[in-house]
Amino acid sequence: MRRPLAWALLAALWIAAPAAAQAPAKDELFGEIDGIVSELAEISGLEVRAKIRYARITRDHLKEFLEQRIREAVRPEEIEAQEAVLKKFGFAPPDFDLKKATIDLLTEQAAAFYDFHKKKLFVIDPRAGLDERSALVHELAHALADQHFHLEKFIGHGSQNDDGALARLAVMEGQATWLMSEYVARQSGMSLKDSPGLVTALSKASEAPSPGQFPVFDRVPLYLQETLLFPYAQGLLFQQALVKKMDKAAFSEVFRRPPESTQQVLHPEKYLEHATPVRPPLPAFSSERDYRGFTGGEMGELDHSILLRQFGGEKEAAAVAPEWRGGYFRLFERKHSPRDWRRMVLAYASEWSGPAQARQYFELYQKVLAAKWKTFDVTSRSADALAGRGDDGYFLLRLDGARVTSLEGLPVAQAVPSASGGAN
């Protein structure tokens, strides 16, 4: 998937959560910074190399900051491409405004952030009920990591692989969330290292806010909700697994050898095994010479899990998504025509752990197509292929061994290859 604008913009937002204790007064809060950083250094083994600068800003100023960061860091065509992909796969409705939704979402959610450019921590004037100290500890963990691993470069190095970039973000946010949680736990004489139940509870608490707590969050598509929270909730569990295996060395190892995919974050054993995703070849279509590439990217395990949950169910997603071994897509636009995501052709391929697992996904993806479109007219069906017409043109879905491919938005019906390689 194309990287969601929410985490392409700000890779170090602390997502607001209900307070566990009364927030300290402003001056008292900032007076704790040196002591907090020293304890984070002791927990992680990362020495403090510089004093951390800080300031407060209002939520209105945060919105201005986000709008400015979009202008500086994200080209308009990138936003257009991300929005087109979300709509083409069915992750977002046709009238969805990605830029507006992202700014509104982050303005609502953020309690503090660490600016990589200015090397400065900002705490946002709080709403009632938010624990400022937790926000501060989380961002100080980012600042400490930045002194050792240059976080802006770290996240930038993953920009060529969308799924890998989200995995890197899970390293950053997962480690900061783990250190924040460990810091708080130690205030009560506990430690995450010997409290697996506490870690699980904290991860679940990070998965989603209570309904009605954040109205903007409640309104945005599931894909934005999930990819915003994934780095915190699953990143915490990932960091916990590596701390159990490597102790303090884990805090450096995840930056020096970051996970390659969201699958490695979801299943830390695959990270430890160095399991590498594959990129399956895309299907070709007969009129491809009349088109040019518009955008493309990886479809990771997390993307497939969200897709199946949105259009299928939790049970199906839990059973099939972990069998993912690779996914890739490209959007093609017609040459010399006005740009319209509805008229773009989506070429998409996924690879699974074996033919049986691929067949499961082949059957489920048919349900995805039927659910995301109002029009779903099947003109040809066989054991390994499905063809017809959807809202945006003709489609062809195929199963080939451990691979499932799909062409969607074709201007004319594509011939269905027979088992012997001919056409039906």
Image (cartoon, grey):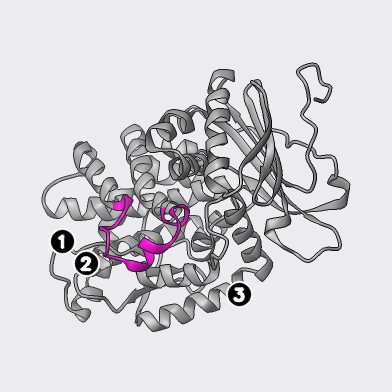
**Could you tell me the amino acid type at mark 2?**
Asp
- The spot of residue 366 in percent (x, y) is 57, 35
Give SS at disc 3.
helix
| Tag 3 residue | 72
The single residue placed furthest to the right in the displayed view is 289
| Tag 2 residue | 131
Give SS at disc 2.
loop
Q: Report the quarter where the C terminus lies.
A: top right
**In the figure, 134 relative to 227: above or below?**
below
Residue 168 vs residue 3, the one in the foreground: 3
**Could you tell me the amino acid type at mark 1?**
Ala
The image quadrant of residue 383 is: top right
Q: Residues within 10 Å of mark 2 (few under 14, many from 20)?
A: many
- The spot of residue 124 in percent (x, y) is 33, 76
Q: Answer whether residue 216 is magenta in the image.
A: yes
**Could you tell me the amino acid type at mark 3?**
Glu
| Tag 1 residue | 20
Is residue 116 among what the camera can see?
yes
Q: Which comes sooner in the sequence, label 2 or label 1?
A: 1
Name the residue at 14% across, 55% down: 187
Residue 56 vs residue 64, the one in the foreground: 64
Is residue 397 among what the camera can see?
no
> Could you tell whether 245 is left or right of 171 in the image?
left
Q: Which comes sooner in the sequence, label 2 or label 3?
A: 3
Q: Which comes sooner in the sequence, label 1 or label 3?
A: 1
Residue 46 vs residue 190, the one in the foreground: 190
Q: Label 3 near label 1: C-beta < 8 Å? A: no
Which residues fall within the magenta stretch?
Answer: 206-225
Q: CA distance from mark 2 to mark 1?
A: 7 Å
Give SS at disc 1.
loop
- The spot of residue 300 in percent (x, y) is 55, 41
- The spot of residue 404 in percent (x, y) is 64, 30
